[in-house]
Amino acid sequence: MTGGRFVGKVALVTGAGSGIGAAAARRLAAEGAAVVLVGRRAEPLEAVAQAVTDAGGRAAVRTADVTVEPDVRELITFCLRTFGRLDVAFNNAGTTAAGGRTDQLELDAWRAELDANLTSVFLCLKHEIAAIEDGGSIVNNASIAAVSGTPSLAAYTAAKHGVLGLTRSTALEVVDRGVRINALITGNVDTPLYRRLSGVDAHDALPPAPNPTGRTATSEEIASFVAYLLSDEITFITGAGLAADGGFTAS
């Protein structure tokens, strides 16, 4: 890579094996970043890394469970040992499995959902902040569940509301270092998780999306916004929840 907003910088992307995370990793690499790809399974990460290197970029793969603190601590050590620094991070890992009415939700399922979607972001922030260069940037994927309610997804919604609050509070703690932390409010994006929740197979057409545009976004559209939020073009924005949701929250 010979040019771009992230030349000379190192980016970390969690949940980088598919969907928004994979697209963001490819976009950051295309703009010059050396990218550390993180996820639980090596095979999809290796496929994304291959796409990055085939395009002339640099990528390293690290399997980790970001709900486990030793894994996260070792992940940051790997990043620094491999590329020598950390400049930007996209905390994208998350999922939802605890569906059903609140009065029927098992406590273990509740706790697992919060671990996957909130504790994971806390642990990544905790260890990224200690390593990130002054003037760096972090984006946490909060989703529209951070600002709206969804019946039968109470645990996921509570966790994502927590991500937005965590983003705001932590951003204020590091503002003196010029480190920016923002939350991404995404909705109706064509990802494996969205298709699973919608009950639509990978190669089938998605139905009209429940937002004013009537369509789902591509992962690449969201990745372009992530790259913008991580770039030095918006150094006056921190502690914000920024929507790329087809007008869902406006309506």
Image (tube, rainbow, N blue to C red):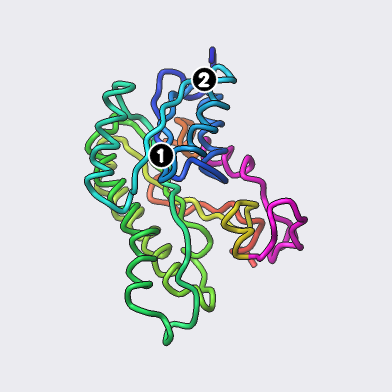
Question: In the rendered structure, which segment of residues is drawn in magenta?
Answer: 198-227
The three-letter code of the residue at mark 1 reads Val
Q: Is residue 212 magenta?
A: yes
* Residue at x 50% of width, y 65% of height: 145
- Residue furthest to the front: 43
Specify whether 148 is left or right of 12. Answer: right
Q: Quadrant of the C terminus?
A: bottom right
- The amino acid type of the residue labelled 2 equals Gly
Q: Which residue is mark 2?
A: 57
Is residue 206 part of the magenta span, yes or no? yes
| Tag 1 secondary structure | strand
Give the percent coordinates (x, y) of residue 74: 24, 37
Which mark is nearer the camera, 2 or 1?
A: 1
Compare marks 2 and 1 and give the one earlier in the sequence. 1
Label 1, on which residue?
Answer: 38
Nearest the viewer among 182 and 106 is 106
Residue name at image x 57 percent, y 40 percent:
223
The residue carrying pointer 1 sits among few (fewer than 14), some (14 to 19) or many (20 or more) residues within 10 Å by Cα, namely many
User: Is 217 left or right of 121, judged from the image as shown?
Assistant: right
- Numbered label attached to residue 48: none
Residue 94, given in percent of the width and then of the height, sits at: 44, 55
The Cα–Cα distance between marks 2 and 1, rounded to whole angstroms, is 17 Å
Magenta region, main secondary structure? loop
Residue 98 rendering spot, x and y as whole percentages: 45, 71
Q: Nearer the viewer, residue 32 or 182?
A: 32
- Residue 4, compared with residue 236, is above or below; it is above
Q: Position of residue 248 (x, y in %)?
A: 63, 63
* Res 188 → quadrant: bottom right
